[in-house]
């Protein structure tokens, strides 16, 4: 029994990273995927911030879903999201000054993320607390993975560096760190993951 | 929707928002004094880093920019004023950029530092790079113009960060220097900077 539930939680996490990856599959939250992925460091920090807020929001919504009148669920989701963002922002500014200096900018941006609202609506408001938590972890990790991949290629090609350290000593493609390059990177990676997915799925149906 | 539904929804919404408001208020009450203290510590640290050769800094007063109170200081070494530091704000893309500017007695910039801002990560926060900040060194108010090409006399904007760069250059630093120069002209003698005239 325990085995079974563990594996279903694992499925939820895998689902968030692969099958329903926020950016590559659901195409949600493309704005941050383009705006903050000019450098690897930005992408990773943003991903971590989203992971945390996503888990907290999912857990909270799942806990209070019994009290929410279905007709006004959206304003309440927004309250929970902005509440968690504000709490995280203020507590980090007060108690984790060094970390806040690195991540403060990213946290305030999260309020506007479609991906978090979407998970609250599609999953957390219909499921129990534990599965919602794992869904949040999966979605957050998927977002982190997507942002890391995008920013890895954009910084490497656009600046010739990674995490701010120079790697290749050639003239970089400036377009990659401009917004246009962000669209290219997201589009090409999305196509790549779709291609892998269709191959993988085909094999699976063929073997059946 | 009946009247009963409307009342139920209203109560539900009000109740949850009041709870949310109370939680936020209590977190704010707990954290805001600490955040305030942190900001003062950060300013002091930045001040020390900005003028490492100074023996002491003495606050001369406050001034207003964009409706915000900012401070300015005299920098002293062996009881002689060797320069000034002024705090200033520039209106950026999504926030007010809080800048500290250190100048010598001729009001040429010795160094600037970005204290805080909330510009877009990955773009706007490039104003924190040394590459951008070092451009200000040795320049005076007449050089505070943002241009998009290579320049030795003015400040060059960073690609994709024009608005934030402009806020630092044409707004924060320029206004700060203008205020200092006006103040020195009026009360210059007592601050020992009369030779600027």
Image: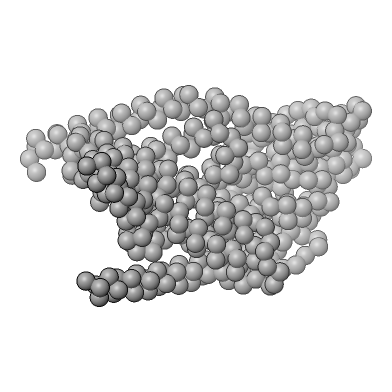
Location of residue A76 by image quarter: top left
**Residue found 77% across the figure and 39% down from its top:** B50
- The answer to which of A73 and A15 lies nearer the viewer is A15
The quarter of the rendered structure image containing the N terminus of chain A is top left
Q: How is the image coloured?
A: one colour
**Residue found 18% across the figure and 39% down from its top:** A69
Residue A192, image x, y percentages:
42, 72
**From where the camera sits, is residue B81 visible?**
yes
Residue A60, image x, y percentages:
31, 37
Left or right of residue A193: residue B130:
right
- The answer to which of B154 and A20 lies nearer the viewer is A20
Residue A187, image x, y percentages:
43, 71
Task: Answer above or below: position of A29 versus B1.
Answer: below
Location of residue A70 by image quarter: top left
The quarter of the rendered structure image containing the C terminus of chain A is bottom left
Location of residue B126 by image quarter: bottom right
**From where the camera sits, is residue A187 visible?**
no
Task: Answer above or below: position of B25 versus A10.
Answer: above
**Residue found 58% across the figure and 58% down from its top:** A39
Left or right of residue A124: residue B1:
left
**Residue found 71% across the figure and 33% down from its top:** B45
- The answer to which of A51 and B138 lies nearer the viewer is A51
Residue A117, image x, y percentages:
32, 49
């Amino acid at each position: 029994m325990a085995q079974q539930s563990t594996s279903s939680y694992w499925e939820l996490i895998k689902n968030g990273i692969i099958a329903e990856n926020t950016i590559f599959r659901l195409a949600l939250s493309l704005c941050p995927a383009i705006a903050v992925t000019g450098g690897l460091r930005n992408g990773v920090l943003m991903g971590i911030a989203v992971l945390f807020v996503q888990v907290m929001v999912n857990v909270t919504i799942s806990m209070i879903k019994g009290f929410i009148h279905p007709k006004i669920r959206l304003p309440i989701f927004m309250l929970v999201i902005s509440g968690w963002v504000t709490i995280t922002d203020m507590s980090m500014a007060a108690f984790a000054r060094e970390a806040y200096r690195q991540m403060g900018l990213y946290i305030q941006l999260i309020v506007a993320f479609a991906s978090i609202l979407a998970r609250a609506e599609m999953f957390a408001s219909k499921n129990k607390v534990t599965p919602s938590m794992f869904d949040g972890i999966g979605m957050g990790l998927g977002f982190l993975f997507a942002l890391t991949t995008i920013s890895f290629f954009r910084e490497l090609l656009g600046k010739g560096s990674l995490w701010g350290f120079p790697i290749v000593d050639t003239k970089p493609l400036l377009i990659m760190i401009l917004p246009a390059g962000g669209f290219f990177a997201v589009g090409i990676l999305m196509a790549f993951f779709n291609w892998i997915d269709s191959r993988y799925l085909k094999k699976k149906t063929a073997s059946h | 929707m009946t009247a009963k539904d409307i009342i139920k929804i209203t109560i539900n919404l009000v109740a949850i928002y009041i709870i949310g408001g109370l939680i936020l208020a209590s977190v704010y009450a707990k954290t805001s004094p600490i955040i305030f203290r942190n900001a003062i510590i950060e300013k002091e640290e930045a001040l020390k880093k900005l003028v490492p050769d100074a023996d002491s800094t003495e606050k001369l007063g406050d001034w207003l920019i964009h409706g915000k109170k900012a401070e300015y200081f005299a920098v002293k070494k062996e009881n002689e004023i060797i320069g000034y530091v002024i705090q200033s704000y520039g209106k950026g893309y999504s926030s007010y950029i809080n800048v500290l500017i250190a100048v010598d007695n001729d009001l040429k910039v010795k160094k600037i530092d970005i204290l805080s801002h909330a510009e877009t990560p990955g773009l706007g926060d490039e104003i924190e790079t040394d590459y951008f900040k070092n451009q200000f060194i040795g320049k005076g108010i007449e050089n505070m113009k943002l241009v998009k090409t290579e320049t030795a006399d003015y400040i060059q904007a960073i690609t994709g960060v024009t608005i934030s760069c402009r806020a630092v250059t044409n707004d924060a630093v320029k206004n700060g220097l203008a205020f200092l120069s006006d103040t020195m002209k009026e009360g210059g003698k007592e601050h020992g900077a009369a030779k600027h005239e």
